Image: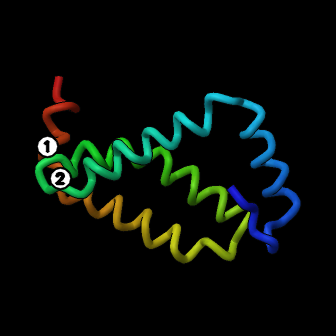
Amino acid sequence: MPVPEEMPERALQVMQAYMTIVWLMPLVGVFEIIGGVLFIFRKTSAIGAIVILPIMVGILLTNLIDVPSGLPIAAVLFLINIWVIYDNRDKYRVLLST
């Protein structure tokens, strides 16, 4: 994957640290694909939103701390994810009931 030229040094260091853990990026990629496919369909969007949520939090924090130029699109995608979770809140009540 080519590295953008305007990437801050701290972000490059973080990305290199991620790459030292060989299994981490393929695992994140698999969860992004699975969560994205689930997110597309109305019937499975509730579980897709939950699968994508930890990844979106990581993307949002990375853009907030290291690469603020990507923050607007990360914030919009995070808000869409929160909206889908809120829209499906009735489906999650079963999981939270004792």
- When the figure is inspected, residue 68 is found, relative to residue 91, above or below; the finding is below
Give the residue displayed 19% in from the left and 50% down from the top: 89
Farthest top residue in view: 98
Q: Residues within 10 Å of mark 1 (few under 14, many from 20)?
A: few
Secondary structure beneath dot 1 equals helix
Residue 63: give x, y in percent of width and height: 65, 64
User: Which residue appears at 84% of the width and 50% of the height?
Assistant: 13
Q: Mark 1 = which residue?
A: 91
Indicate the amino acid at tag 2.
Asn
**Disc 2: which residue:** 88
Total labels: the figure holds 2
Residue 21 in which image quadrant: top right
Q: Secondary structure at mark 2?
A: loop
Residue in the foreground of this view, choosing between 97 and 24: 24
- Residue 80 at x, y = what percent? 34, 66
| Front residue of 64 and 47 | 47
Q: Residue 35 or 62: which is nearer the viewer?
A: 35
Q: Position of residue 60 (x, y in %)?
A: 57, 60
Label 2, label 1: how many angstroms apart (C-alpha)?
Answer: 6 Å
- Which corner quadrant holds the C terminus? top left
Q: Residue furthest front?
A: 1
The quarter of the rendered structure image containing the N terminus is bottom right
Label 2: few (<14), some (14–19) or many (≥20) C-alpha neighbours in 10 Å = some
* 97 over 69 or under it: above or below: above
Which amino acid lies under the numbered mark 1 shown in the image of this protein? Lys
Q: Residue at x 20, y 31 (%)?
A: 95
Residue 2: image tag? none
In this rendering, position of residue 5 left or right of residue 80: right
Mark 2 touching mark 1, by CB under 8 A? yes
